[in-house]
Amino acid sequence: MPSSVLLEVPALADFNKAWAELTDWLSRLDREIKSQRVKVGDLDDINDMIIKQKAILQDLEQRRPQLDELITAAQNLKNKTSNQEARTIITDRIEKIQNQWDEVHGYLQNRRQQLQEMLKDSTQWLEAKREAEQVLEQAKAKLESWKEISYTVEALKKQNTELKQFSKELRQWQINVDVANDLALKLLRDYSADDTRKVQLMTDSVNASWAAINKRVCEREAALESALRMLQQFYLDLEKFLAWLTEAETTANVLQDATHKEKTLEDAKMVRDLMKQWQELQAEIDAHTDVFHNLDENGQKILRSLEGSEDATLLQRRLDNMNLRWSELRKKSLNIRSHLEASTDQWKRLHLSLQELLAWLQLKEDELKQQAPIGGDLPTVQKQNDIHRTFKRELKTKEPVIRSALETVRIFLAEQPVEALEKVCPEPRDLSPEERAHNVTKLLQRQADEVRTEWDKLNLQSADWQKKIDDALERLQGLQEAMDELDLKLRQAEAFKGSWQPVGDLLIDSLQDHLEKVKVYRAELVPLKEKVHHVNELAHRFTPPDLQLSQYNLSCVEDLNTRWKVLQVAVDERIKQLHEAHRDFGPTSQHFLTTSVQGPWERAISPNKVPYYINHETQTTCWDHPKMTELYQSLADLNNVRFSAYRTAMKLRRLQKALCLDLLSLSAACDALDQHNLKQNDQPMDILQIINCLTTIYDRLEQEHNNLVNVPLCVDMCLNWLLNVYDTGRTGRIRVLSFKTGVVSLCKAHLEDKYRYLFKQVASSTGFCDQRRLGLLLHDSIQIPRQLGEVASFGGSNIEPSVRSCFQFANNKPEIEAALFLDWMRLEPQSMVWLPVLHRVAAAETAKHQAKCNICKECPIIGFRYRSLKHFNYDICQSCFFSGRVAKGHKMHYPMVEYCTPTTSGEDVRDFAKVLKNKFRTKRYFAKHPRMGYLPVQTVLEGDNMETPASSPQLSHDDTHSRIEHYASRLAEMENTNGSYLNDSISPNESIDDEHLLIQHYCQSLNQESPLSQPRSPAQILISLESEERGELERILADLEEENRNLQAEYERLKQQHEHKGLSPLPSPPEMLPVSPQSPRDAELIAEAKLLRQHKGRLEARMQILEDHNKQLESQLHRLRQLLEQPQADAKVNGTTLSSPSTSLQRSGSSQPMLLRVVGSQTSETMGEDELLSPPQDTSTGLEEVMEQLNNSFPSSRGGNAPGKPVREATM
């Protein structure tokens, strides 16, 4: 909006602010509700979303009055202003926010209706899916109940009937599956903007199971039809084969008879015809070999189905008869061939036949070797098994041929005489007939033995190979089943993993539910781990010498292990992400605090949960919140307040308001502390506990003061302040007592109620408190002004003098009760005076006094009112008083009384009487009756430290605080020891705490030409202090150097004594190592040297520390000297001369002003010390002057004073 319009219509600024806040809230709400996705098909998730939508809608309706107020304010602004541009802007903004409101409200209404419809549709789909899953279970149970196919007509018909009935049921059940699919498609189509992965996944699973069932039904139907066809064809084929077998047997018998006729073998033509007929017969036998084997296998199947019946017996007989006739037919064929081949060269034919058999056996042996090794996967081994079955069938077919050949050789050798052998073996001629016969016999016998040996060997190798194949098949089937089962489980697990939404898309409130689900899912994966181990164990059993897995199987096993590892990593990573999200964004996280800062700042969290802040523009980080940094910078404006108690109280009041703790009642604070069970005061609190408790506190304040409390900002600021006060090292922990002390000290409550509550926290169960417990309370309390750099003005951080003061007040009792503690606190001890002053500052903020400031002429006076008890009708406002401004004729050391509430007539009369008395009193009277505004305690240099809690690791600025305390303490000591420079009118035991008065007295002493032995200026005092410090350090250094020289001499003496005894020389101290003593004297010398070396190291360390301390003191004193040597400029204000300016050091050193006694309603006065130095007042004041002052002080009309009596314990 143009600045000119804002200047013309100032009320537009408030309207713009309210409009911007509501617009931002609506924008955030719109983004939030549009980013919310629900899991379709999950009734719990949908119901949760409906509840959330309802809550959001209620929140929107609760904000409706805010919109109405904004519209009303806009209308009022339009009515009040005549600026057309302003009216147009207001109209546009109201229309925009109304449209935005209506859009958000309409979206919420539509979304709520959509969720209701989604809930209804999801319920229907889940019901339909449940029914579909039920029919799937029934179908699976039916499939499992199926028996093996029986090869009988009745059984096949029965199984076929059952299959048809089952197919009919499947067609009926198809309706349930279709209904579930239709509803799923409706969900997928209508709610595609939401998460439909669950619906898709479950639908795919149901359809896959249904398709598998239908496939098995089709396969069963085909198998039954094949079995029925085979059964019907078997008997026809059997009859046909038996008929052929009869014809073949007849042909074989005819050929056998023909070959055995006499002189048949001598007719070569006859032999060739018979050989041709035999070859035809053998060809038919070979052609029917497969038919025979098929009939035999099918017959065995039918026999198993007919087991125990008469049909089985009949079929068994027919099969046995067929096998017997088949074997006899083959034998006859072989015999016919052998007989036809018998001639004069029969031994040669036998020899060739045996050679052929040996060659065939060698070929088969090579073929068997080529089948090795065993395959590494199930398909390969099954193929090898099929090949070997064919190989065995060939062996079985060849077996009669081999046995027939061997039998023929045996018969030939047995029947042929030696003469016949001589004829058939005429060569060589130089051999005798007996030798030739013997050679033929030996040759044939050797070949026959080789054939027999090779045949037996081949059968053994075949059997061994078959055994290996069977073993490999069994093991590979076990491995394959295990891998298939593991693959199925992994696919199911991966499907569930695939349904996970990104963690960033999850609702914050659902993080814990998702985390629990993933943990349950991880527990369900434990059995899967056993399956993985089982698969790996089975795979490791396949060793290379025996059986090596194929590359495919190894890849499958590796893939399964990889998927398992990926799944584990995914689950662990998911849990980790959910944990981190729950930690960072969950109910116990600090996520809601990220809105406490605006760009370019970003809130970050250290590993110990402590927040820090990143400035992306300057690329720097800091512990303090940007607003806290601005607040601390703004507190510098209060440094012009001369008196530290008021300065500290005003800083704390500003801090209290910034943290909104001025709205927090003590009862609300106690309720929040009790709600979080913070009862053990010595227990530490971590950051999350602090944030949770502060969130509870500020949530309640937000309900009571909606427009005043920004919960994230207040929580973050208060946390920042508590850490600055009690955990400057950012360890992430503070004690419960510290938390209570900080919060209760700044809350809104009566002062004595705070005292009682704090005392109760450290008191025992009997209601008494000892020195240690009181020290703990005062230690935590003094940290509050310490954090502001004001602790030196309140006795320093050593709380022992305050504790001693309290127990001295209680007559040194070992324990005190609450009443004594309250009485002591009413005296406002120096270490705690800032707290009652804070209450008076709060009470005086709204006070309006019907009086005029005699310096700045402010009327009426707002805040504190200071009435002079030396002059009639003389008042000063708090601004003039705090800055040290005075009017002509009045001095700062004159007695005055403070009012934080309007005065009453009785108080006016009482003050008049006191003024009248003070008119007739001399300053010597006030010197004998000094009064202080608080109960003083000893300085920080007095007494020993008491037990205090272990402090946290301090940051670098804590050293500065410590140095300030030290310098302030030294200054206080110097003031006490050098108080004799005042003139004789000052009491010797008086202490001048106000630094302005101190400098003034120094100046007066210079004007009065004090003796040269007395200090003449602050610079001289500091020079004296510096010389004392330097002299003291020089003496300490000289002593240490002398002690070091003595130690060196002692070491040299011991070294010479050691060498004199003939021992090896001692090493120098830095190189000395422990050695084993050779004698008691040696041990004593070495131990003494070691102690001397350690003592020397300690002394050198002390020297270094003192030298560093000396350098720090020199630097600080140099700065102080520069400040105090600046020329003092006199300024005239209302005719009054101001003395020295207020410096930061003076502010730190000045405590509660000595010239005041602030008591709320029961105000009393005291007189400053400077009055004692002023000239004597004229005690012979005339009656006329008194009457004139009476008339001026008490005019006839008294209505100007506001009624009411100020209370002592004003509630902040």
Image (cartoon, rainbow, N blue to C red):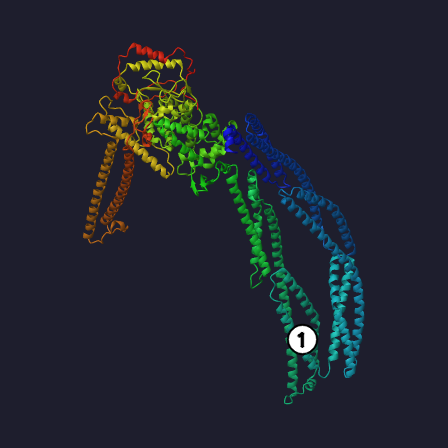
Picture coordinates of residue 368, whole percent (x, y): 63, 69
Picture coordinates of residue 580, whole percent (x, y): 51, 42
Task: Name the residue rendered at 43%, 42% in the picture.
Answer: 618
1100 shown above or below 839: below
Quarter of the image with the C terminus is: top left
Extreme-bottom residue of the structure: 430
* Res 431 seen here: yes
- Badge 1 crowding class, 10 Å Cα cut-off, few under 14, some 14 to 19, many 20 or more, is many
Task: Name the residue rendered at 61%, 58% in the picture.
Answer: 475
- 328 or 1180, nearer to the observer: 1180
- The residue carrying mark 1 is 357
Q: Is residue 558 left or right of residue 841?
A: right
1207 shown above or below 398: above
Picture coordinates of residue 1205, whole percent (x, y): 41, 16
Question: Under tag 1, what secondary structure?
Answer: helix
Amino acid type at circle 1 is Leu
Q: Is residue 363 left or right of residue 1023?
A: right
Picture coordinates of residue 90, whole percent (x, y): 56, 31
Q: Is residue 22 left or right of residue 1180?
A: right
